[in-house]
Image (tube, rainbow, N blue to C red):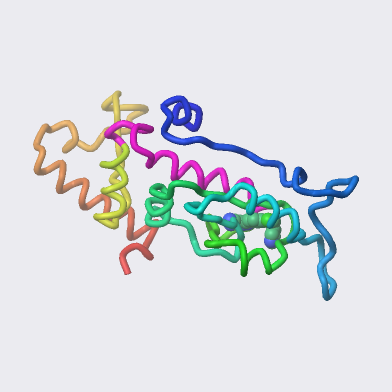
Amino acid sequence: MMGRAQEAGALLLQIHDLRAWTHDRHHVVDDAPFGGGQGMVMKPEPLFAAVESLRTDASMVVLMTPQGRRFDQVLAREFSTAPHVIIICGHYEGIDHRVIEHLVDAEISIGDYVLTNGAIAAVVFVDAIVRLQPGVLGHEQSAADDSFSSSGLLEAPQYTRPAEFRGWKVPEVLLSGHHAEIAAWRQREAQRRTRENRPDLLS
Ligand code: JFT
């Protein structure tokens, strides 16, 4: 989808190697944490140099981090209108906090589980934003998003042919052609599914 989006001129994705903004022989971007502790921390100098050389007046600087605000469709919509987003995605235990205090506009986490690096989270973040760019997806997108964000419910189950598979039948109402009954069935099933899988969406 990213390829299609770029061909359509909907956006431009550029990937940068932080080591390009180092000056030492070994292009070091990490160091041991002050105060001791496990693992390595990303040094501030290459990150400041990289972001300060890439940003414009219109840039939003995002840091993917497990300590960030939880990413959701509301945030995806917000970022989809930003003219320029710089995403910092490291792969050490953390980042020097001065980067967060003085360089980053938003700390974002894609969810409450632990990944090995921020680039994996960045792929999720970018995908959710790219599909919201005008001209990237057809009309199928807005309808699907609206049903999620405005009804606040999960989608009802869907079926396609055959009407019977291994003895398992598609619910009769979906074959009936009664649009009002189908709508009522989908509403009930959406509520049932939401109660079972995502009770947090109901409270
Ligand atoms: C993990 C991350 C997100 C998000 C950025 C950077 C290094 C590895 C790590 C592992 C354990 C504790 C850091 C990152 C994420 C998420 C994002 C980094 N690591 N601290 N993990 N889980 N949901 N977004 Cl830089």
Q: Does the magenta stretch include residue 127?
A: yes
Query: Residue 93 or 34: which is nearer the viewer?
Result: 34
In the image, 182: left or right of 93?
left
Q: How many marks?
A: 0
Look at the picture and state if 9 lies above or below 201: above
Residue for point 26% across, 48% down: 147
- Name the foreground residue: 187 vs 117: 117
Q: Where is residue 145 in the image (x, y as percent from the top left)?
A: 31, 46
Ligand 1 rendered quadrant: bottom right
User: The C terminus lies in which quarter of the figure?
Assistant: bottom left
Q: As rendered, which of 102 and 129 lies closer to the eye?
A: 102
Above or below, comparing residue 113 to residue 86 in the picture:
below
Q: Does the magenta stretch include residue 168?
A: no
Q: Is residue 95 left or right of residue 196?
A: right
* 59 versus 98 height, above or below: above
Quadrant of residue 174 within the rendered picture? top left
The image quadrant of residue 137 is top left
Q: Could you tell me residue 136's position as x and y percent?
A: 38, 32
Query: Residue at position x 34%, y 62% from top?
Result: 201
Expressed as whole percent of the image width and height from the top left, the position of residue 194 reads 33, 56
Residue positioned most to the right: 25
Question: In the figure, residue 42 lies in which quadrant?
Answer: bottom right
**Seen in the image, is 121 located left or right of residue 159?**
right
Q: What stretch is highlighted in magenta?
A: 115-140
Where's residue 4, x and y in %?
45, 27
Taking 70 as reference, is 49 left or right? Answer: right
